[in-house]
Amino acid sequence: MKKLIILIFILFVSGCKTLAETVFTEPTIQIEDVTITDLALSGVSLDITFSIDNPNSIGLTLKKFLYKFYIEDEKMVESDKEEPLIIEGNSKTTQVVPITIKFSGLEKGITGILNKDELKYAYAGFLTLDTPVGDMMFDLETEGEISMPRPPVFTIEKVNMKEMGLASATIAFHVKIENNDTTSFEVRNFDYLIEINDYTVSEGEENVTYDLDKGKTMTIEIPVNLKLLGLKRSVLDVIESGNFDYHFKFNLELDSSFGVYEIPYEKEGSAELY
């Protein structure tokens, strides 16, 4: 008699499960949109929107949600959430996943991506739903490109002799920084090193606060003060002749919502002072 009751119970449970599977329709889960909410040379913020469409009269529960986000095939973010979310019956629920990436976390850093027009991204999500027929696993995947802002363009507009005396001279380097992109940049600081004929004649740092709006330019005059008595003979000769080759190194410090970052520049050229 006891065995008969157990057998009847097993058949009943099995029958209920089969009936549930028959009347249950698998929910549809898909990526709806990927929206970039903030972008700079130093990072990106974006919203990934996905939906869960439950066509059944009974509600479901999102038990677990894991996702990974990649930039240029490097895993930048991994998150695991286990906060239950109820999906009502006969309804469609939309969820937004905000993701913020700092490019300084890339193996090649910010300087390694400055010349790239686009960065590849990939998103992989894994969801577990509690349903009347047991736990169901779903994958969410999408990929695309992030169009990168163009860095400011750095040029030496001119080099001229600003002042010449018996014991000293001042040469002025006029540096133009152009923003040809649609993104504004906040210039905070720059440091430089100037060589004339392979000899370091000046190095320093300038603190500035300048908002370089899209399509705008800024010009910085860097005076190089030379003590003639302390210079090498070869440098004195080229200054007196008015023709010399220079090597200019320049680090531009910019600020953004992702933090402060630097862009290195380097320029070689020839100057005629007179």
Image (cartoon, rainbow, N blue to C red):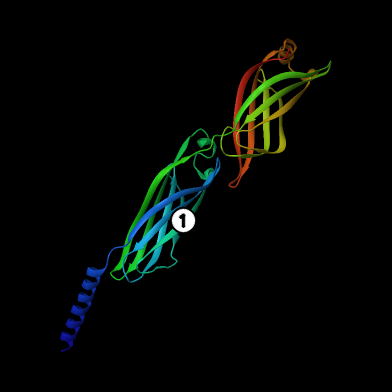
Q: Residue at x 67, y 35 (%)?
A: 190
Q: Residue at x 46, y 57 (%)?
A: 96
Judged from this view, the residue extending furthest toward the top is: 241
Write down the residue under mark 1.
Answer: 97
Judged from this view, the residue extending furthest toward the bottom is: 1
Quadrant in the rendering for residue 240: top right
Is 10 placed above or below 104 here? below
Out of 194 and 144, give the one closest to the viewer. Answer: 144
Is 220 placed above or below 25 here? above
Out of 266 and 39, give the one closest to the viewer. Answer: 39
Question: Disc 1 residue type?
Answer: Val
Q: Quadrant of the C terminus?
A: top right
Judged from this view, the residue extending furthest toward the front is: 90
Q: Residue 44: percent from the left, percent from the top?
A: 52, 46
Out of 212 and 65, give the one closest to the viewer. Answer: 212
Q: Residue 51: percent from the left, percent from the top?
A: 39, 58
Is 100 placed above or below 53 here? above
- In the figure, is residue 235 to the left or right of 116? right
Q: Give SS at disc 1.
A: strand
- In the figure, is residue 245 to the left or right of 38? right
Quadrant in the rendering for residue 59: bottom left
Other residues around mark 1 within 10 Å, as few (<14) / some (14–19) / many (≥20):
few
Q: Quadrant of the N terminus?
A: bottom left
Q: Residue 237: percent from the left, percent from the top?
A: 73, 11
- In the figure, is residue 163 to the left or right of 18? right
Q: Residue 143: percent from the left, percent from the top?
A: 39, 45
